[in-house]
């Protein structure tokens, strides 16, 4: 199971190519022990926006709908199994079941299809990257962790005062990896029974 957030976390970098951004401060890797205040973060974003090559995108209702349509088309075409999705004004949360594609390929597929649709509908200039990097991913392999993540994703819009979201491509969680028809000898099933992991 891959839970992914895009575009809120860009790829980790060891250098800052933009001099204007470099003047804003040093790179920091990982999560800070003491988080900055919301006002400090907003101030940073306002200052950084002036140094960016492209204007920061904020999805409005029609753009959120376009992203959802593109996600739905990709998920149906491949197909992927999606258990939760929240498309926010400045980031996206998606929970996809394990697939033969690597998580990076799944993210790239959703980013690519949605970027093409956003550009085709004229929401931003043709050279705008739309997404900021390859996203951030977490792997889940126990039902309770999956359920907890689904609840977190579903609550995201309402926590920001936005309407709850319900997308046709999101399926009801089927207790994966212990869903009907699963192999009792899979690594997940053995781990769930307390057996050591074996290749």
Image: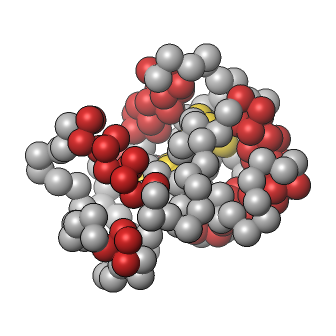
Residue at 66% across / 28% down in the picture? 172
Question: Residue placed farthest to the left in the image?
Answer: 34
Residue at 74% across / 44% down in the picture? 67
Provide residue 130's location: percent of width, then percent of height.
65, 58
Q: Quadrant of residue 29?
A: bottom left
Q: Nearer the viewer, residue 96 or 86?
A: 86
Q: Nearer the viewer, residue 15 or 50?
A: 50
Q: Quadrant of residue 198?
A: bottom left
Provide residue 174's location: percent of width, then percent of height.
62, 33
* Left or right of residue 86, residue 48 in this image: left
* Left or right of residue 3, residue 23 in this image: left
Residue at 54% across / 43% down in the picture? 90
Provide residue 161's location: percent of width, then percent of height.
50, 17
Residue 94 appears in the figure: no
Quadrant of the drawing holding the C terminus: bottom left
Provide residue 30's location: percent of width, then percent of height.
24, 62
Residue 167 appears in the figure: yes
Q: Nearer the viewer, residue 144 or 73?
A: 73
Q: Nearer the viewer, residue 129 or 173?
A: 129
């Amino acid at each position: 199971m891959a839970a992914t957030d895009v575009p809120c976390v860009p790829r980790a970098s060891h250098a800052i190519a933009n001099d204007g951004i470099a003047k804003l401060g040093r790179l920091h890797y990982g999560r800070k022990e003491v988080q900055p205040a919301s006002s400090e973060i907003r101030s940073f974003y306002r200052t950084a926006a002036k140094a960016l090559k492209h204007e920061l995108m904020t999805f409005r209702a029609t753009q959120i709908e376009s992203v959802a349509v593109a996600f739905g088309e990709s998920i149906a075409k491949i197909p992927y199994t999606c258990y939760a999705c929240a498309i926010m004004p400045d980031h996206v949360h998606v929970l996809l079941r394990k697939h033969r594609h690597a998580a990076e390929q799944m993210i790239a597929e959703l980013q690519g299809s949605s970027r093409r649709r956003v550009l085709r509908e004229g929401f931003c200039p043709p050279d705008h990257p739309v997404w900021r990097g390859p996203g951030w991913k977490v792997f889940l392999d126990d039902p309770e962790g999956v359920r907890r993540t689904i609840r977190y994703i579903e609550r995201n819009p309402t926590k920001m005062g936005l309407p709850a979201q319900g997308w046709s491509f999101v399926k009801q969680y089927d207790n994966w990896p212990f869903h009907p028809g699963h192999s009792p000898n899979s690594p997940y099933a053995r781990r769930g029974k307390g057996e050591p992991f074996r290749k």
